[in-house]
Image (spheres, coloured by chain):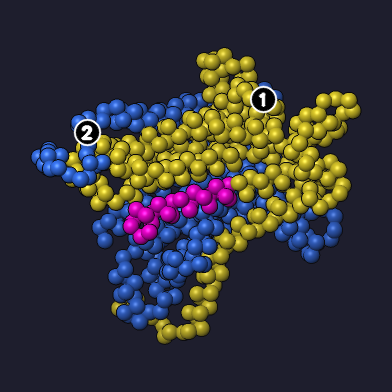
Chain colours: A blue, B yellow
Amino acid sequence: MTSVSETVTAVDSPLTSYQFGPKSKGTLPRGLTLAAVLIIVLILAVIMFNIILGGLGIISWKFLSRPPEQGMEAGGIFPAIFGTVALVFLMVIAVIPFGVMTAIYLHEYTRPDSVTTRLIRVAVNNLAGVPSIVFGLFGLGFFVGFIGSGIDSIFYEPGRPVWGQPAIIWAALTLSILTMPVVIVSTEEALRAIPRELKEASYALGATKLQTIIRIIVPQAMPGIFTGAILGISRGAGEVAPIMFTGAAYYLPYLPTKLNDQFMDLGYHIYVMATQSPDVEKTKPILYGTVLVLLVLTFLLNFVAIFIRSRIRTRRVNA
Amino acid sequence: MDKYRFKPKSRIREFIGEKFIALNALAALIGILLIFIFIFKEAVPIFSDREVQEEASLSKMLYKQVYYEGREPKWSWQPNSTVPKYSLLPLFLGTIKAAIVAMLFAVPLAVGAAIYTSEFASRRMREIIKPVIELLAGLPSVVLGFFALVVLATALQKTFGFTYRLNAINAGIALGIAVIPIIFTVAEDAMNAVPKSLRDAAVALGANPWQVSFTMVLPAALPGIAAGVVLGFGRAIGETMIVLMASGNAAIISASFTESIRTFSATIAAELAEVVFGSPHYNVLFFIGTLLFIFTFVINLGGDFILNRLKKKLQGRS
């Protein structure tokens, strides 16, 4: 390397602007940028340790399986865990078909520079950037106020709202729009990793495009779709702003069993306990415990997704 | 081979299949249109309804108002007072203050880490940094809000002796932590997109690795880094739970960063639950939502545009 650079500087080059000064090893920029990395790692470590240390003491079978007691100062958080799981379950059922079909359409049917593709891409990117509180407003205005009340006015006697009120189905649908970009991006990545030969072999055997998609492409993309679903769940489980007006309740004496029931949610539980509790010191252990449960839930899901995705990436490199 | 025998072709099925998939692919597009329509719809009375305008017109939201006879005109956000006041200025100030702190905190860390990861890090180091950033991105904002409210606020107050425990700096730092992954990811992508041929050319001209980074890669990737910062700013403006929990939620006019603030997003989150359906207050909250939507929409379009142009340029297609 040195000999090459010496030759270049020795030649009377017209490219004077590209002559480099005396060699510096760049210790300073290297050190500064490394410090930035270390600070970020440190921030994550501090947050994790604080929450693990604060929450580990209270985690017990009783805490995970019992409803809250004495105005949240004792008991467990089972209804909130149940509500969150039910919520993301409904959400994922709603988001997967749309997300997967969008990805397939973008990747298999249209050229990357066609107007439709570009419009859809712009929409997907923007959807990912819409503030979550705006999704909350939308869920209230559209799902609860428009769809829900619409169903009520057509099928039910006027009076008490049946569907035109905050409910778990509306919260789940709101979240499904919020998480759609995650599913689309993840599925697309999986589609890109499918070797072209597979598709060509399918066509060579006489399959049509639709047959190829259903029997070759979708099965091959399954790990990616699965990753997208997990990432979507992990994202959805932690969101609070979109569900606080569309279905989440602070305390319910029953578990949600119907689609138009309200529900308790881990994230919302954390928010209300942290900001509106009359005696913060008394609820603090439960609060920490709830945060730990939510964190473990989202991180476990994230780890699984990262693991699957890294396997997809290796496959693409090998192909 | 039975597994690979396909049924005879059916044109109708192909056609219906394609159209069905295409229809579903429009979901994102329809979604974003519906979001705009249904949020703006509830804000319309501010522009059309006389009665609503009596209480909350556009000029009442923007300019100083005399609320009580004989008093000084002022900007004030007190929607639940007997004389409801809907000035957006205190909220605007709060939003901007939190976002400024967030960016001052996040940009050096995120861009620095992105440079290190793309230019200096060994393969193994990269395999540590990437998951850390992904985990940080996976932290629910309510958890960050909780951390800022319970731990960070106390620590900052003890260290710097702030009068108010919950203030713009506290909320801004927590917001910065939430924004780091976005800036990092976009900036690192941009630097990775710089083609190897450019790096090789610099090496051939006698640059050592860090000279390659700073005279070749960084300038080439600069628009991408800028896009990352812009997108991070958009996220900081719209983020809700963190500021709702960690900012103190006081709508005051002040230039000080150590006083409590109230942001646009937190205002919606805090007030929508108690507001009377269809009241002027309700309309104003949806109007704020419309503003947030439009603002983030423009930011995202801009960021996207910069990134696309950069990608084309780096691939030599422009």
Mark 1 chain: B
Q: What's the magenta bit mostly, secondary-structure-wise?
A: helix
- Magenta residues (range): B296-318
Query: Label 2 amino acid?
Result: Gly
Q: In the image shown, does A30 or B125 lie closer to the viewer?
A: A30
Q: On residue A21, which mark appears?
A: 2
Q: Position of residue B181 (x, y in %)?
A: 45, 40
Vertical order, B63 against A74 (above or below): below
Determine which quarter of the picture holds residue B66.
Answer: top right
Q: On residue B254, which mark appears?
A: 1
The magenta stretch spans residue B190? no
Q: Position of residue B9 (x, y in %)?
A: 43, 84
The answer to whether residue B274 is visible is no
Q: Quadrant of the C terminus of chain B?
A: bottom left
Q: Nearer the viewer, mark 2 or mark 1?
A: 2
Classify 10 Å Cα crowding around label 1: few (below 14), some (14-19), many (20 and above). Answer: some
The magenta stretch spans residue B301? yes
At x 56% / y 65%, what residue is drawn? B26
**In whole angstroms, how far apart are the C-alphas of marks 2 and 1?**
49 Å
Determine which quarter of the picture holds residue A199.
Answer: bottom left
Q: In the image shown, does A211 or B109 lie closer to the viewer?
A: B109
